[in-house]
Amino acid sequence: MRSARLIDAVRAITRRRRLAYALVAVVVVAVVALPARELSADNDADARPTIPKYALRINITPLPISRPIPSAFVGFSIEYRSLLPYSGRNPASPNPTFIQLVRALTPGGSPVIRFGGDTTDWTWWPTPGVSKPPGIRYTLNARWVSMARATAHAMGARLILGINFEADDPAIAATEARALLKGLGRKLIAGFELGNEPEAYGALGWYDTAGGVSVPGRPVTYGFGSYLRDYAAISSALPHGVPLVGPASGAPAWIAGLNRYLGANPRVRLVTFHRYPLHRCFTPPGSPTSPTIPHLLSRDASVGPAASLQGAVAVAHRRGLQFRVDELNDVSCGGARGVSNTFASALWVLDALFNMAKVGADGVNIHTFTDAVYGPFTFAGAGGRWEAHVKPMYYGLLMFARAAPAGSRLLLAEAPGRPNLRVWAARARDGTIRIVLINDARNRAITVAVRSPGASAAGTLERLRAPGLRATAHVAIAGQTFGARTATGELSGSSTRATLHPIQDRYVVQLPPASAALITLARS
C-alpha cells in the first residue's frame, strides 16, 4: 500500500509539474506573440522604463539652420514627350491619379512642374519658313498645350517650360515660346528656360547622320563665353512678358560664371542647376559614382549635390532671386535597375531633400519620364480609368512632405557620428517639431533617445519600411501603402501611427535596418 500511495503521490506531483510547465509555455508564447511596442512611460508603472544604455542620445536644439521651406519645394521635371502618357489626351478629364500624387507632395501649395530635360532641345513648334532641324524628335501641337493647361489647372501648378536653344535659331525659340504663351496663358508659366545643360553641346551629339555619325549642336570649343553670346541673341527674341529661367546647367564649373550670367541677363528671375550623384553613362564600374546601393547611400551621394550648389544658392539670394534644382534624381541617363527602383532610393531622396533645404534651395524637381528606371510612378489608362504603379522613391518624397510642411525651418540636431544614421528636425509655423531618423544599414538596428526643446508630452511615431534596401515592392509609410496599383493615388490600409511617450525627457525609438521614422511633437 505504501508503495502504491507513494507511486500515486509521485504521479500527482508529476501531473502538477506538467501543468505548471504548460502554463508557463502558454504565457511565453503569448508574450512573444504580442506586437512590438515603443518604449514609453505609460508602460507598467512598476517597470519604471529607463533609457537603454546602448541608445544613441540625440539633442534637437532650438537653433534654426535654414530658411523657411517654400510651399512648392517638391516638384517634378518631366520630359516633353511624357506629358500625354502621364495626363492622358482628354483635356476635360486629365489623369486624376497623376494629379493626386503630385498634389499630395505640396498640400495647400502650388507645385512647380518643369517640362524639359533632353527633350528641351529635341522639341520645337513648327516655325514658318524654317525647315525642321535634324535634332528635332518631338513636335509640340495644340493637343499638347491643351493637356498641359488642363493638368496645370487641376493641380494648381505653375510651369517652367524648356525652350529649344541647341537649334541656335532665334526664330525657332521665339515661335515655340509665343505658341506656349498663347496656349497656356501668362499665369500658368513660371518662366522660359533656354536650353538644357548647354555645357555639353560641344561634346554630345544632337543628332546622328544617315551614316551613323554623331553631330554635336555646337563646336567642341563651345564654352561659357560662347553660351553667353548665344543666350543674348536668342533670349532677346522671346516674349518679354515672361521671366527667364537658367542656366539649366549640370556643370559645377559653371557656378563660377553665375554672377556674370545674371548680370548680363536681368530678365532671369529663377536660377536653375541640375544634379545627379551617380552616373550610368560614361562611368567605369569601379568609379565611386557608378550606380550601386552602397554608393547611393554614401554621404557623398546625399550631401554632395547640395554642398556643390551652396555657392550658387548664395549668389541667387544676394540678387533677390529664387534657386531651384529643377532636375534631380539618383542616377543619370534614366537611372539604374537594381538601384533607382529600390527602397534605397526612398531613403536617399529623403536625406537629399533635407540637404537641399539646408543649403537654402527654394525647390527641387525630381526628373522623370515614361520609361525611366528612376521614375517615381508609372501610369496605365483605358476607357477613362487610370491606375498608377507607385515606386519606392515616391514614399521617400511623401515622408519629406509630411516632415517639412511649408514654412518649416530646419533645426540643429546634435547627434553622435554614426555612418548609417541620419537625423533631421524641422519646426513648423505652429511650433510643431518633426524629427526624421534614417537608418540605411542593411542588417543592423539602431536605438536612439531624442530630446527636443520644450517637448514633454506624448508625440506620434510613423515609420517608412520595406522588406530591405533592395526591395522594389511592399513599401509602407505608417503601415499604409499604394499597393501594386492604385486608381486613387491615395494610401490605403490601416495606419500604424503610434503614440510615443517620453522617458526621462527623451523619446526612445528603435530603428530597424533599412527604415526611417518620423516623430511629431506638437507644441506644448
Image (cartoon, helix red, strand yellow):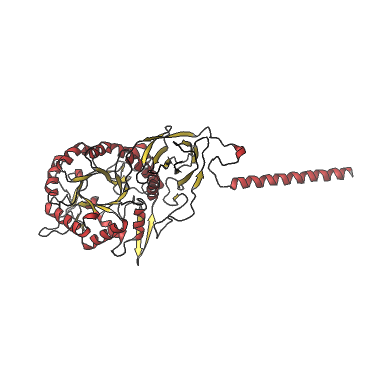
Q: Nearer the viewer, residue 367 or 457?
A: 457
146 on left or right of 7: left
User: Is 508 above or below relative to 30?
Assistant: above
Residue at x 24%, y 62% (from the top left corner):
146
Percent position (x, y) of residue 199? 19, 43
Q: Nearer the viewer, residue 267 or 129?
A: 267
Q: Residue furthest right?
A: 1
Percent position (x, y) of residue 383? 35, 67
Whether residue 210 is visible to the viewer of this picture, yes or no, is no
Residue at x 26%, y 39% (from the top left corner):
313
220 on left or right of 146: left
Percent position (x, y) of residue 500? 50, 43
Q: What is the quadrant of residue 103 in the picture?
A: bottom left
Q: What is the quadrant of residue 11 in the picture?
A: top right
Quarter of the figure with the N terminus? top right
User: Is 77 above or below relative to 43?
Assistant: below
Q: Residue furthest left?
A: 129
Percent position (x, y) of residue 23? 69, 46
Whether residue 144 is visible to the viewer of this picture, yes or no, is yes
Q: Residue furthest bottom?
A: 383
Q: What is the quadrant of residue 305 in the picture?
A: top left
117 on left or right of 13: left
393 on left or right of 41: left
Q: Nearer the viewer, residue 66 or 281?
A: 66
In the rendered picture of this protein, how many numbered marks are placed on residues?
A: 0
